[in-house]
Image: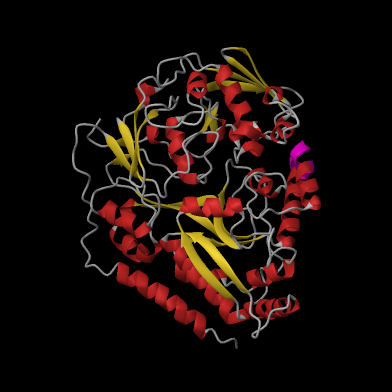
Amino acid sequence: MLDRRTLWTALAVVLLAAQVGCSRAPDSGNTTTPPAAASAILLRGSGAEPDSLDPQKARSVESQNILRDLCEGLTTLDKSAGVAPGVATDWTVSADGKKYTFNLRPEARWSNGERVVATDFVAALRRLADPATASSYAQVIDVIENASDIVAGKKPPEALGVSAPTDSTLIIDLATPAAYLPSLLSHTSACPVHRPTLAQHPTELAKPGVMISNGAFVLKEWVQGSHILATRNRNYWNDAATRLDGVKYLLIPDESAELTRYRAGGLHTTYVVPRGQFDWIQANLADQLHIAPQLDTYYYGFNLNKPPFKDNPGLRRALSLVIDREMLVQRVLRVGELPAYGWIPPGVNNYTSQSFDYRDKPLAERIAEARRLYAQAGYSAARPLRFELRYNSGEVHNKVAVALTSMWKEALGVEARMTAVEFKSLLQDIDSGNVQMFRSSWLGDYNDAYTFAQYFKSNFGINLPHYRSAEYDSLIGKAGVEADATKRRELLEAGERVMLGDHPLIPIYFYVNKHLVKPEVEGWYDNVMNVVYSKDLSLRNRR
């Protein structure tokens, strides 16, 4: 039997630290609420500092969560994460599936009172595809006619297949049919842009006092490392349904610190729930705890442009083989996450999640194979693999890093150095190639397998491992133009199997949504996209 004592010792340290962190005497949940004030301001946990609040430039989940309150696209999401009308009241599609016509509501307004018109969306989508914008999400709209050539610099932004024959009509011509287009357009990167502001402030579009937005709230204040304040947009077309005067997003990347703030009455809702104190939360705050599935994959990525992982799929496979994902989710994470042996999470519409070919093999067999691959790659006890694992600071990231580096050390003798940095620094390091292995995650932008499959296309701007496979590109490209739903699914599933065989990253677990919500918050809901618009919420006895 394999000796697991080294690993269990490391994990015991992690779990003991978590227990110490929640060793306070029970206080019946400490449901103290934020002090009364003249205005109904929702205090919302927001995680790490947003990288940007410019709709076409923002790339982090934290940014997009705030942007959903500040801007509104042609479409939005309903409470179950289904597509719903936004600025567009309705839309039609041509018989061949390649032309969409959106009808805009005449009452839609910018926060300065000006009307939101179709040309504002034309400008935004052109800006998204324009290489000068350097948007990481440019390829998200590659299904639109000429988008790929524009992103590649082969055609001007004006060639994009979008037009505005009238102020109330937007036409989008597609290169291939895409039934998911209305859902895709709910993403914040497709939000409209206020053209006069863009012309006057091209690099400061998203600053307080400058930003003109069309959502239920408008940016009022951004204090780096502290909070972002958005106040009610009285010019929003559906302002009559808004019941909050504003939203204050508390920028608290540390899970335990966020819980402390929540218990002290400084938050109405949390961004996450700390795993180390989950048992205490279940015992004392069960009525305020929300847990639901989420379309999000937590992974470790390899830098495929540099050694030791470049051109070395066997070594990459070996590191994945020895990870005991079941033990990780049960003993370290412990809040319902699912072990990830594939890339695309369960629950995606019209898709069957694929898995590594070793998913059902006993761990002992996997470790034996990993040791063979490790030796074939030229590593041994005398010459161990050494590399740096870089990740953003945070309680859960620290725990996962300790657990996995311990598994690699015990099973293979790997010496992995852990380096925790701020989230923005991590993104910069990844973009500059200054990483060997890095921690990241991918949250589906819409409920379709293509939002995950697209991530690994060779030309996709957020393909962080820099995975390149002609076979994969061909399969996903064919899926993109396939109108038959069954054939399209088969192509996407085949593509995922090809990618998993190459091991460009290590999927570790599938997320679940985890929030604490105060009893006085009314209207909260859960869905697989983890999208809860502040405009749908209210504070009891306040408005």
Q: Quadrant of residue 381?
A: bottom right
Residue 107, placed above or below residue 535: above
Q: Looking at the image, which is closer to me, 420 or 265?
A: 420
**Residue that appears at 70% across and 24% down:** 161
Q: Give the camera-side residue of 169 and 55.
A: 55
Q: How is the image coloured?
A: secondary structure
Residue 532 located left or right of residue 91 = left
Can residue 292 be seen here?
yes
Using the image, determine if residue 138 lies above or below residue 424: above
Q: Main secondary structure of the magenta part?
A: helix
Specify the segment rendered in magenta: 478-487
Drawn side of residue 437 relative to residue 214, left or right: right
- Taking depth in this image into account, of 215 and 486 the one nearest to the observer is 215
The answer to whether residue 327 of the structure is visible from this angle is no
Position of residue 302 in the picture relative to residue 82 (left or right): right
User: Left of 302 or right of it: where is 288?
Assistant: left
